[in-house]
Amino acid sequence: MATAVEGGGGEAPHRSPEELVAKAIAPVKPQYLRPPPVRSSGDSTGGDGDVGKEKEKTGDAAGSGLVKEKKSKRQLKRERKQQVQSVANMCTEVARTGNVDSCPFGSKCRFNHDLETYLAQKPADLEGTCPFDSEEKVCPYGVTCRFLGTHKQNLIIQSQDLQRRKSHEINNLDKDLQKSLWKGKVKFPNAEAQLKLLGLKGGKKERLETDGEQDEIKDESVKEGDKVEEESITDDESRPLKKSKNEVDAESTHETNNGTCCVEEDCENEIAEGKIENNSPKDSLKSSFKVDIVPKLQLREKKLIDFRGKLYLAPLTTVGNLPFRRVCKGFGADVTCGEMAMCTNLLQGQASEWALLRRHPSEDLFGVQICGSYPDTVTRTVELVDSNCSVDFIDINMGCPIDVVVNRGAGSALLTKPMRMKSVIQAASGIIDRPLTVKVRTGYFEGRNRIDSLVADIYSWGASALTIHGRSRQQRYSKLADWDYISKCSNNAPEELNVIGNGDVFSYCDWNKHMSQCPKMSACMIARGALIKPWLFTEIKEQRHWDITSGERFNILKDFVRFGLEHWGSDNKGVETTRHFLLEWLSYTYRYVPIGLLDVVPQRLNWRPPSYYGRDDLETLMASDSAADWIRISEMLLGKVPEGFTFAPKHKSNAYDRAENG
């Protein structure tokens, strides 16, 4: 172990652990401290500029300030065509079988069929064995696999082995369904009937009427103290939705014991008063209303999930992918949820968005999270997912703080529109028998919390569980989560509603503290804590602090890489995709400080680690906040990076304050 430098980390030499904790600096033992590494002017901490030289070569604005040449659509199309026809883009059928004549398109195929040329320029194989070529399974990537040398030569690759790679994953997008979504041929009978029942047809006129004049999306630049008109809602006085001339008023309908809606008596009264013309027999009038009505299930009739005491891994954008969830399941996570998917993208059949819904068989309690702005898009998406995916619950995100989401009226923007929240939850919950959950923040603006007044309403609208992140949208991820307010919300909630707290859980002590202080709360959701140390689930279940070694942490990265190659593929594209998501994850893991190096245990999520030496070289490397060192770790697992490779974390800001997850 290297000797420490007095005053290492740029701090005062004799600052006590209590003083460091007060300034949110991790109190690392003095003998492990070291001076911060010297970086060039183009570099910055946190990985945003650690590849400054490469950025300057590519003309990035943060580097040399050069502006990239803007290319026309024709030029981009030409480049894409050349890329498809390049030697590196091997025909998948030829690659799988090793036979040039196996491609059904023959000479008309747009991809490369020259096996000899491809093998001559193919990168060297990686160390290790192919994740598919085991237990008599055949690698679906054939000659393009980066582990080709380990393939069993006595196995013949057949075309029906194409789906072998994804056979262990659930919720793959069906090609016929995707084409139907592209052409707009998918019907949503339950959603349409429910929207009509609630007076929400989804057109532009109805949307404007439902939202009201004061329901405008508030730009995040509004300063604290500015007056913002927000709707208020109570149990007895809520603004009714405006209806078109002959629509059924949802507020005037009532339900019988069997769940069917009866409106005949009200219609007869309106006919007697001359409000509706009686041009048809009574029976036909009854049938005309019954066609459009969906029997609404009472909450007691729905399939329920008991979240009490369960370890819930939060849906995390980018980093909460399927391989990462498999890692967390191995450490004891009970509930997992897919990454946030946008409703409009799912309805358009975008394959990249549908990939966020994939589920691994090890995820025994799994949900998907969707995000949308209006009742019609959310309800249709819920019906689409319910009909074509295997999920245990569907979560609606009403707390995402990302600008691009909020500016579309989704995520946290819905916190300023309780009437639209009501419409979304009522419409979506009325067409499925599986639980519908909602994730929110305390409010839109800091210091103006409002969820406590809506908790009971959210349950009556049809939600089975409510997750509350203890920060406002304006706070993003700055300051500590307000668990006192979460406790207040859980006390206001009906007993049947599962209230789940979220924010800053980073040790079993945090879990125990929040669960004891909020006895009516069902569970805690774990988000960034799992990103930094996924073994947190084991610590909570075993009620101990795990002083994990660097070798054990490196084995976790190995598992992620293996899961990533199974998920994204073992060809060159799959390897680089796995590398990209590994680097995204490493932009969080470096913030972990080993237990044995701390003067105060446990570590808090808001502590900033100083520069320090680990107990071995690998631990020191893992503690680096430089993207160049993260790339070195990826090369230890996935080989050398391609020429000209660059990386900057997707969150593009300090991970302590803004992590773009829902």
Image (cartoon, rainbow, N blue to C red):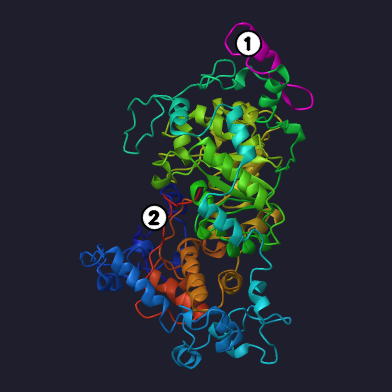
Residue 489 visible:
yes
Instruction: Name which residue type carries label 2.
Output: Asn
Tell whether 589 sits left or right of 386. left
**Is residue 263 one of those drawn in magenta?**
yes
- Residue 316 visible in image: no
The residue located at (38%, 62%) in the rendering is: 46
Q: Would residue 68 be found to the left or right of residue 372 on screen?
A: left
Task: From the top left corner, tell me how far across and down residue 639 is, in percent.
Answer: 48, 82
In front here: 298 or 560?
298
Query: In the picture provided, is 516 more to the left or to the right than 573?
Result: right
Residue on which the image places disc 1: 271
* Residue drawn at point x = 54 percent, y = 52 percent: 181
**Residue at the right extreme, as displayed:** 258
Label 1 or label 2, whichever comes before in sequence order = 1
In the image, the segment drawn in magenta is 255-280
Spatial CA span between label 1 and label 2:
65 Å
Relative to residue 514, is residue 371 drawn left or right? Answer: left
Give neighbour class at mark 1: few <14, some 14-19, many 20+ (Cα, 10 Å). Answer: few
The picture places residue 449, in percent across and down from the top left corner, at: 48, 30
At label 1, the amino acid type is Ile
Could you say which is closer to the camera, residue 603 or residue 62? 62
Q: Is residue 58 above or below residue 233?
A: below
SS of the residue under disc 1 = helix
At x 31% / y 33%, what residue is drawn?
223
Name the residue carrying label 2. Answer: 654
In the rendered image, residue 7, in percent from the top left (x then y), is placed at: 36, 63
Q: How many marks?
A: 2
User: Magenta stretch containing residue 309, yes or no?
Assistant: no
Q: Is residue 105 above or below residue 413?
A: below
